Image (tube, grey):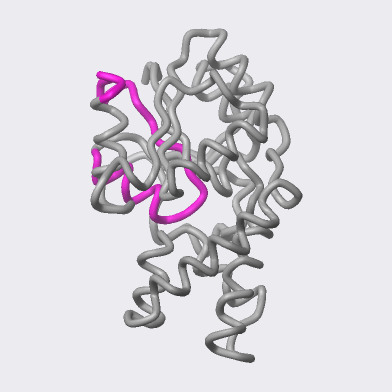
């Protein structure tokens, strides 16, 4: 497979924002459901959109809860977000080699752009897709279709890289190869039911896979 275009999820894939996201959820849930959640139990909310999560928890108060989540997140964003190991240098290498890069996230556009700036990733992505760019969240393929339409890229040469089941299913639903990152907060057991097309242990291994280097070490599911 020749890979020309790579779509990345942002949180948990490029940006290590897991602690920020989990703590933001816990701060809200402790107010509305005192004593019912822990940092470990809120991990399951890391991946789905805020709308999906809080509509399920309390449809009547979901917007209020989302606003409080965003307030907390904004205060601690810069001090609690960082890049995973090898991300910046490998993104720059891929771009240098002519690979087209994009971000497809469930995050609000302004917060997504803020994270990209803070982490010194400006100028690396041809397209950045956030929550205001589509109607249906992953695992619906619409966010991926939106990115691909703007890039005018082909299904056969495009992959989606992510850290959770929503990314994998969205890629499958869009008809492109899914790549799961081994540095995800999600365990292999949690991800196994989603059957990612490829699993990479490190950002360097992902780059090798994309550039088709012989040193590649990945787990690939062949159908």
Magenta-drawn stretch contains 172: yes
Picture coordinates of residue 154 (x, y %)?
Answer: 25, 21
Q: Position of residue 47 (x, y in %)?
A: 47, 58
Q: What residue sits 47% from the left and 73% below the top?
A: 65
Q: How many marks?
A: 0
Q: Magenta stretch mostly in which secondary structure?
A: helix
Quadrant (top left/top right/bottom left/bottom right) for the N terminus: top left
Residue 71 versus residue 96: which sits nearer the camera?
A: 71
User: In the figure, residue 129 lies in which quadrant?
Assistant: top left
Residue 78, relative to residue 204: is it above or below? below
**Nearest the eye: 151 or 33:** 33
Residue at 60%, 51% (x, y): give it: 184
Q: Is residue 160 left or right of residue 153?
A: right
4 sits to left or right of 219: left
Q: At 68% from the left edge and 21% from the top edge, which residue is drawn? A: 89
> Image quadrant of residue 124?
top right
Residue at 48%, 23% (x, y): give it: 125
**Horizontal side of residue 52 vs 134, given as left or right:** right
The quadrant in which the C terminus is found is: top left
Question: 147 left or right of 110?
Answer: left
Camera-side residue: 212 or 157? 157
Q: Which residues are magenta?
A: 150-174
Extreme residue toward the right, this view: 79
Return the x and y of residue 115 as percentages of the image width and height.
Answer: 59, 39
Q: Is residue 56 above or below residue 209?
A: below
Indicate yes or no whether the magenta region holds residue 140: no
Residue 158 lies in what quarter of the image?
top left
- x then y, percent, for residue 202: 65, 36
């Amino acid at each position: 497979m020749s890979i020309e275009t790579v779509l990345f999820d942002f949180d948990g894939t490029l940006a290590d924002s897991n602690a920020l996201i989990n703590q933001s959820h816990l701060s809200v849930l402790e107010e509305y459901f005192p004593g019912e959640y822990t940092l470990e139990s809120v991990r399951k909310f890391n991946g789905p959109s805020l709308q999906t999560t809080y509509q399920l928890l309390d449809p009547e108060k979901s917007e209020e809860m989302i606003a409080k989540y965003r307030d907390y997140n904004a205060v601690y964003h810069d001090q609690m977000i960082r890049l995973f190991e090898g991300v910046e240098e490998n993104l720059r290498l891929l771009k240098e080699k002519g690979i087209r890069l994009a971000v497809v996230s469930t995050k609000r556009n302004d917060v997504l752009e803020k994270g990209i700036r803070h982490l010194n990733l400006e100028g690396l992505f041809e397209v950045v897709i956030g929550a205001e760019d589509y109607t249906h969240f992953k695992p619906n393929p619409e966010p991926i279709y939106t990115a691909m339409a703007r890039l005018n890229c082909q299904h056969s040469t495009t992959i989606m890289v992510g850290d959770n089941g929503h990314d994998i299913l969205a890629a499958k639903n869009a008809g492109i190869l899914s790549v799961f990152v081994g540095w995800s907060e999600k365990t292999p057991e949690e991800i196994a039911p989603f059957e990612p097309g490829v699993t990479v242990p490190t950002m360097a291994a992902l780059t090798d896979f994309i550039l088709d280097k012989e040193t590649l070490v990945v787990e690939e599911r062949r159908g």
